[in-house]
Image: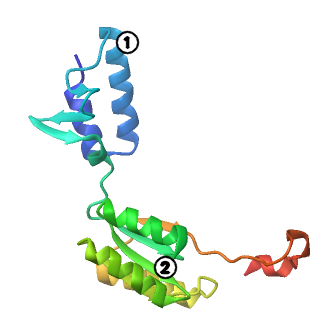
Amino acid sequence: MGNPAAMKKMYETGGASLVRGLTHMLEDLANNGGLPAQVTSTTNKIEKEGNDLNTLDLYRLDGKVAIVTGGGRGLGASFAEALADAGASVVLCSRKVEACEQVKQVIEAKGARALALACDITRPGDVQLVVEAAQETFGGIDILVNNSGATWGAPPEEMPLDSLNG
Protein backbone atom coordinates (compact mmCIF):
# COMPACT_ATOMS: atom_id res chain seq x y z
CA MET A 1 0.00 0.00 0.00
CA GLY A 2 1.21 3.51 -0.71
CA ASN A 3 4.11 4.60 -2.82
CA PRO A 4 7.01 5.62 -0.52
CA ALA A 5 9.17 6.76 -3.45
CA ALA A 6 6.42 9.08 -4.69
CA MET A 7 5.89 10.47 -1.19
CA LYS A 8 9.62 11.10 -0.76
CA LYS A 9 9.85 12.84 -4.15
CA MET A 10 6.75 14.90 -3.32
CA TYR A 11 8.39 16.05 -0.09
CA GLU A 12 11.78 16.78 -1.64
CA THR A 13 10.67 18.67 -4.74
CA GLY A 14 7.19 20.06 -4.07
CA GLY A 15 5.38 21.72 -6.98
CA ALA A 16 4.43 19.41 -9.84
CA SER A 17 5.72 16.43 -7.86
CA LEU A 18 3.10 17.22 -5.23
CA VAL A 19 0.38 16.67 -7.81
CA ARG A 20 2.02 13.46 -9.02
CA GLY A 21 2.43 12.24 -5.44
CA LEU A 22 -1.20 12.96 -4.63
CA THR A 23 -2.23 11.21 -7.84
CA HIS A 24 -0.29 8.11 -6.75
CA MET A 25 -1.96 8.26 -3.35
CA LEU A 26 -5.41 8.49 -4.95
CA GLU A 27 -4.57 5.54 -7.20
CA ASP A 28 -3.56 3.58 -4.10
CA LEU A 29 -6.85 4.47 -2.46
CA ALA A 30 -8.79 3.28 -5.50
CA ASN A 31 -6.75 0.08 -5.89
CA ASN A 32 -6.43 -0.90 -2.23
CA GLY A 33 -9.61 0.45 -0.69
CA GLY A 34 -7.98 2.52 2.04
CA LEU A 35 -5.35 5.06 3.02
CA PRO A 36 -1.74 4.22 2.17
CA ALA A 37 0.32 3.10 5.16
CA GLN A 38 2.42 6.27 4.94
CA VAL A 39 -0.50 8.62 5.64
CA THR A 40 -2.81 8.63 8.62
CA SER A 41 -5.88 10.82 8.53
CA THR A 42 -5.81 11.37 12.29
CA THR A 43 -2.33 12.92 12.43
CA ASN A 44 -1.92 14.63 9.05
CA LYS A 45 1.63 13.35 9.00
CA ILE A 46 3.69 11.66 6.34
CA GLU A 47 6.31 9.10 7.23
CA LYS A 48 9.59 9.70 5.41
CA GLU A 49 12.26 7.10 6.06
CA GLY A 50 11.05 6.54 9.60
CA ASN A 51 10.56 10.22 10.51
CA ASP A 52 7.15 11.76 10.97
CA LEU A 53 6.73 14.87 8.89
CA ASN A 54 3.84 17.31 9.25
CA THR A 55 2.00 17.96 5.98
CA LEU A 56 2.79 21.67 6.29
CA ASP A 57 6.49 20.81 6.02
CA LEU A 58 5.81 20.19 2.33
CA TYR A 59 5.26 23.93 1.94
CA ARG A 60 8.33 25.24 3.79
CA LEU A 61 10.21 28.08 2.09
CA ASP A 62 13.56 27.64 3.82
CA GLY A 63 16.34 29.10 1.70
CA LYS A 64 13.92 31.05 -0.52
CA VAL A 65 13.90 34.83 -0.92
CA ALA A 66 10.71 36.85 -1.35
CA ILE A 67 10.19 40.47 -2.36
CA VAL A 68 6.92 41.97 -1.14
CA THR A 69 6.01 45.32 -2.67
CA GLY A 70 3.76 47.39 -0.43
CA GLY A 71 5.07 45.25 2.42
CA GLY A 72 4.77 47.86 5.14
CA ARG A 73 1.10 47.50 5.97
CA GLY A 74 -2.16 45.70 5.27
CA LEU A 75 -2.06 42.63 3.07
CA GLY A 76 1.58 43.21 2.14
CA ALA A 77 2.66 43.07 5.78
CA SER A 78 0.55 39.92 6.29
CA PHE A 79 2.06 38.27 3.20
CA ALA A 80 5.56 39.18 4.37
CA GLU A 81 5.02 37.76 7.86
CA ALA A 82 3.50 34.55 6.46
CA LEU A 83 6.41 34.07 4.04
CA ALA A 84 8.88 34.61 6.88
CA ASP A 85 6.95 32.19 9.11
CA ALA A 86 7.31 29.60 6.32
CA GLY A 87 11.09 30.14 6.30
CA ALA A 88 11.70 32.67 3.52
CA SER A 89 13.95 35.68 3.82
CA VAL A 90 11.82 38.71 3.00
CA VAL A 91 12.57 42.00 1.24
CA LEU A 92 9.92 44.55 2.15
CA CYS A 93 9.60 47.61 -0.05
CA SER A 94 7.28 50.57 -0.21
CA ARG A 95 7.33 54.29 -0.75
CA LYS A 96 7.01 54.55 3.04
CA VAL A 97 10.11 52.74 4.27
CA GLU A 98 9.28 53.49 7.92
CA ALA A 99 6.31 51.12 7.75
CA CYS A 100 8.54 48.45 6.19
CA GLU A 101 11.05 48.93 9.01
CA GLN A 102 8.32 48.16 11.56
CA VAL A 103 7.33 44.95 9.76
CA LYS A 104 11.01 44.03 9.47
CA GLN A 105 11.35 44.30 13.25
CA VAL A 106 8.35 42.00 13.75
CA ILE A 107 9.81 39.44 11.34
CA GLU A 108 13.28 39.57 12.88
CA ALA A 109 11.80 39.24 16.39
CA LYS A 110 10.50 35.83 15.26
CA GLY A 111 14.01 34.83 14.15
CA ALA A 112 13.57 35.32 10.41
CA ARG A 113 15.59 37.53 8.06
CA ALA A 114 14.21 40.69 6.48
CA LEU A 115 15.32 43.80 4.64
CA ALA A 116 13.33 47.05 4.43
CA LEU A 117 13.80 49.38 1.45
CA ALA A 118 12.22 52.48 0.01
CA CYS A 119 10.80 51.87 -3.45
CA ASP A 120 8.35 53.58 -5.75
CA ILE A 121 7.52 50.80 -8.19
CA THR A 122 6.62 53.32 -10.89
CA ARG A 123 10.33 54.21 -11.02
CA PRO A 124 12.46 51.55 -12.76
CA GLY A 125 15.58 52.75 -10.95
CA ASP A 126 13.98 52.10 -7.56
CA VAL A 127 12.90 48.63 -8.66
CA GLN A 128 16.41 47.84 -9.89
CA LEU A 129 17.89 48.88 -6.54
CA VAL A 130 15.50 46.53 -4.70
CA VAL A 131 16.45 43.64 -6.99
CA GLU A 132 20.16 44.32 -6.51
CA ALA A 133 19.80 44.64 -2.73
CA ALA A 134 17.87 41.33 -2.56
CA GLN A 135 20.54 39.58 -4.58
CA GLU A 136 23.41 41.07 -2.59
CA THR A 137 21.84 40.48 0.82
CA PHE A 138 20.15 37.11 0.35
CA GLY A 139 21.74 35.69 -2.82
CA GLY A 140 18.80 35.74 -5.23
CA ILE A 141 15.06 36.11 -5.66
CA ASP A 142 12.57 33.25 -5.72
CA ILE A 143 9.20 34.84 -4.96
CA LEU A 144 7.55 38.15 -5.87
CA VAL A 145 4.39 39.40 -4.20
CA ASN A 146 3.47 42.41 -6.31
CA ASN A 147 1.15 44.01 -3.77
CA SER A 148 1.76 47.75 -4.23
CA GLY A 149 -1.21 49.74 -5.29
CA ALA A 150 -2.96 53.05 -5.08
CA THR A 151 -6.55 54.03 -4.57
CA TRP A 152 -8.66 56.65 -6.23
CA GLY A 153 -10.92 58.64 -3.94
CA ALA A 154 -13.82 58.91 -6.37
CA PRO A 155 -16.06 56.66 -8.49
CA PRO A 156 -14.13 54.74 -11.17
CA GLU A 157 -15.88 56.55 -14.02
CA GLU A 158 -14.31 59.80 -12.78
CA MET A 159 -10.76 58.41 -12.82
CA PRO A 160 -8.70 59.91 -15.66
CA LEU A 161 -7.48 57.25 -18.09
CA ASP A 162 -3.88 58.50 -18.01
CA SER A 163 -3.72 57.81 -14.27
CA LEU A 164 -4.12 54.07 -14.94
CA ASN A 165 -0.62 53.98 -16.42
CA GLY A 166 1.22 55.01 -13.31
Q: Indicate the quadrant where residue 42 lies.
A: top left
- Asked whether the viewer can see residue 129, the reply is no
State yes or no: discs 1 and 2 in contact (Cβ < 8 Å). no
- In the picture as drawn, the residue positioned furthest to the right comes out as 157
The three-letter amino acid code for the residue at tag 2 is Gly
Determine which of the numbered discs, if any, sits on residue 71 in the image. Answer: none
Residue 104, percent from left and from top: 36, 80
Residue 73, percent from left and from top: 51, 76
Residue nearer the viewer, 81 or 60:
81
Residue 60, percent from left and from top: 30, 54
Q: How many labels were placed on the picture?
A: 2
Residue 101 located left or right of residue 149: left
Q: Determine whether the residue tagged by mark 1 lies in a helix, strand or loop.
A: helix
Q: Whole-Å distance between the Cαs marked 1 and 2? A: 48 Å
For residue 50, above or below residue 28 = below
The three-letter amino acid code for the residue at tag 1 is Ala
Q: Indicate the quadrant where residue 116 lies.
A: bottom left
Residue nearer the viewer, 65 or 96:
96
Q: Residues within 10 Å of mark 2 (few under 14, many from 20)?
A: many
For residue 13, above or below residue 36 = below
Residue nearer the viewer, 92 or 136:
92
The residue that disc 1 covers is: 30
Residue 134 located left or right of residue 152: left
The residue that disc 2 covers is: 72
> Which residue appears at 37% of the width and 12% of the height?
30
- Asked whether the viewer can see residue 60, the reply is yes
